[in-house]
Image (spheres, rainbow, N blue to C red):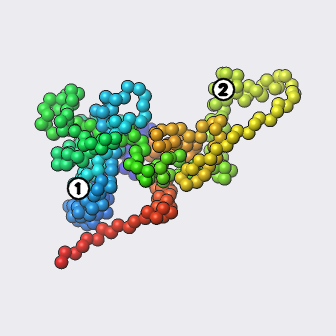
Amino acid sequence: SQRTREKTSKLMDVLTPRFSLIDQVEDLLRVEMKKALGGTDEANGYDDYDVDLLLRRTEGGSLRIGLMDRRQLSRVVTTYEVYVPEAYVYVNQFRNVEDVVAASVLSSFLPGLTGPLQGSNCPHNASVQRASRQLSQLMRAIPHAIRQEGSHQPVDILSHDHNDDDKDNNNGDDDNDDVPYTHFYDGGLAHLFPIVNDSTIIVSPFNGIFSNPCICPPMPTASNANSTSSNEQSVAREAKRFLDSIMEQFGRGTSNVVDQKEKKGPQEAPPPPKEPEKRSRTTNNRTSTALPSFPSTIRVSPVAELGLNLDNLETMRRMALSSDDATMEAYYEKGYTNAKHFLRENHLLTKFSSIRAVPQ
């Protein structure tokens, strides 16, 4: 967040021209991963980290990083679809930290938002270019490192590395690897909440209803509704006023009803309306009550419905704009607390050690 504030304008924030968020976090991610794996040689970029420890932690495909294959997306999307499993691929084989960093960079790459609009051809930011080259090398070393979500078959990236559009970016030379074309973007563009099986734990910064076990903020309930801040109440009033103005176009707004009553004078009170039948759902191991008359969630994937509430709106605003350090720390603390609570309740806490075995 500090780098973002220093290198962007207050007006444009992360949309400041020539600013790339993933270029700012690439080095930080690389250093922290190497240090976590036992790297201590700061002068040489912590390259003395334990590669074997990384391979043991990721063996058997335990680490999956999701990506969207742009080529598949262009072939299958003919309507406004949110869920496009044909375009979703994942990386689950790695040789070193650089492979993990490359997959992570591209899994966060949204052209023009988190990264350069020109992708690997950007002359000012090179993280996408480095990541694309690294994954290309990974595919040559381990052909099955990147797989399709549905069939789990290896992605045949090498046989069609360059389509007609790519030739313009590579001067028509299939062997030219100096500026690799970017095939992979953020996997959330194709599949927002991918799951492996019924035991997959979904982690989300938004509250909602999920088919699988989830680590996420709790949905607002009646018990905490009374503690809503005055600012949130004013936002809710403005939202209601806006909805009323829309409904008045159809003669159904609340203010329209009040005006009619004032003109006609007192009338016989109508019979009390029937109370809508309530339904209960499980959200993050907590039960909340929602009224079917007004949607409290919106479906974003086959396994997830996100809550339509002020908490999620505020989280989305914080994600889109840079926040101060205190706000970021507060959000990280909430996420850490929710994750630790979930893992402890489900007996899933595991402690890893980066201490190397001393050779005999």
Q: Quarter of the image containing the C terminus? A: bottom left
Q: Residue at x 33, y 69 (%)?
A: 353
Q: Is residue 103 left or right of residue 260?
A: left
Q: Is residue 276 among the parts visible in the rendering?
A: yes
Tally the marks. 2
Q: Which residue is mark 2?
A: 247
Where is residue 101 shown, x and y percent of the image? 28, 51
The Cα atoms of the two marked residues, 1 and 2, are separated by 58 Å
Q: Residue at x 77, y 35 (%)?
A: 273
Q: Which residue is mark 1?
A: 96
As drawn, 286 above or below 161? below
> Looking at this view, is 23 or 210 the one in front?
210
Instruction: Look at label 1 and name its amino acid.
Output: Asn
Residue 162 disc label: none
Where is residue 87 shown, x and y percent of the image? 33, 36
Instruction: Look at label 2 and name its amino acid.
Output: Met
As drawn, 358 above or below 317? below
Q: Badge 2: few (under 14), some or many (20 or more) residues near its Cα, within 10 Å?
A: some
> Looking at this view, is 122 or 140 the one in front?
140
Q: Residue at x 51, y 42 (%)?
A: 305
Q: Quadrant of residue 297?
A: top right
Where is residue 356 shown, x and y percent of the image? 25, 71
Callout 2: SS: helix
As drawn, 292 above or below 259? below
Nearest to N terminus: mark 1 or mark 2: 1
